[in-house]
Image (spheres, helix red, strand yellow):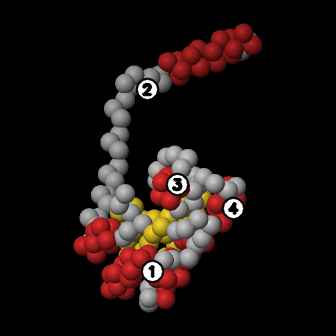
Amino acid sequence: MSRALILSLLTTVSLTSACKKEAPPVNPTPEPAPATPAAPAAPEAVRQLISNFQRVHFETDSSTLSDESKRALDTNAKILQGNTEVRVQIQGHADERGTSDYNLQLGNGRADSVKKYLVSMGVAGSRLEVISYGEELPAKQGHNEAAWSANRRAEFVVTWGQGVEGTTPR
């Protein structure tokens, strides 16, 4: 066979096999999204904690709990003791005065004070997570004592199992 004939046959075979391919559908039907399991409903203890947890406020440059703050935490400690599946993230905050680093440390000290108090009331420390937001998430906007005092605080996020249920009521 001549070289030209072999090339011609190979080209014909190539073109023929290329034509046999099926084109993909133009508008394929999208696959349904996998079902996402719904978050479980909050247990009664979690709803009770959320409605009961109050913000804890602090004096300027202080992470010391006042007697009023301790009273606000006492009931919550009892609820936490009776409901071991519940966990709490304690978020420390500061007002806008001071450096960012100082305010992060101060917020951490405030959240840690709350944690230490709850532990002293019998709540397992492993159920309490401490985080500081410093001045980054003010509760109240403004550059005056009313705003600053509202922003010197600790707040709470209550969690259980795989669920998360809101933050401290505002």
Q: Which residue is mark 2?
A: 24
The residue positioned 70% from the left and 59% from the top of the image is 101
Q: Position of residue 136 (x, y in %)?
A: 57, 52
Label 2 crowd (10 A; few <14 / some 14-19 / many >=20): few
The residue positioned 69% from the left and 16% from the top of the image is 6
Label 1 crowd (10 A; few <14 / some 14-19 / many >=20): few
Image quadrant for the N terminus?
top right
Q: With 14 as the anchor, is 158 left or right in this view?
A: left
Q: Position of residue 27 (x, y in %)?
A: 37, 24
- Comparing labels 1 and 4, the label whose residue is closer to the camera: 1
Q: Of the numbered discs in the image, which one, if any, rests on residue 86? A: none
The residue positioned 53% from the left and 62% from the top of the image is 152
- Comparing labels 3 and 1, the label whose residue is closer to the camera: 3
As helix, strand or loop, the secondary structure at mark 1 comes to helix
Q: Which residue is mark 1?
A: 67
User: What separation in Å lies between label 1 and label 4 (alpha carbons)?
Assistant: 25 Å
Q: Are marks 2 and 3 in contact (CB under 8 Å)?
A: no
Q: Which residue is mark 4?
A: 102
- Comparing labels 2 and 1, the label whose residue is closer to the camera: 1
Instruction: Specify which label sits upstream in the sequence, 1 or 4.
Output: 1
The residue positioned 59% from the left and 65% from the top of the image is 60
Q: Is 68 or 50 nearer to us in this picture?
A: 68
Q: Position of residue 109 (x, y in %)?
A: 61, 72
Number of marks in the rendered image? 4
As helix, strand or loop, the secondary structure at mark 4 comes to helix
Instruction: Specify which label sits upstream in the sequence, 3 or 1.
Output: 1
Q: Are marks 4 and 2 in contact (CB under 8 Å)?
A: no
Q: Which residue is mark 3?
A: 145
Which amino acid, mark 4? Answer: Tyr
Instruction: Specify which label sits upstream in the sequence, 4 or 2.
Output: 2
Q: Are marks 3 and 1 in contact (CB under 8 Å)?
A: no
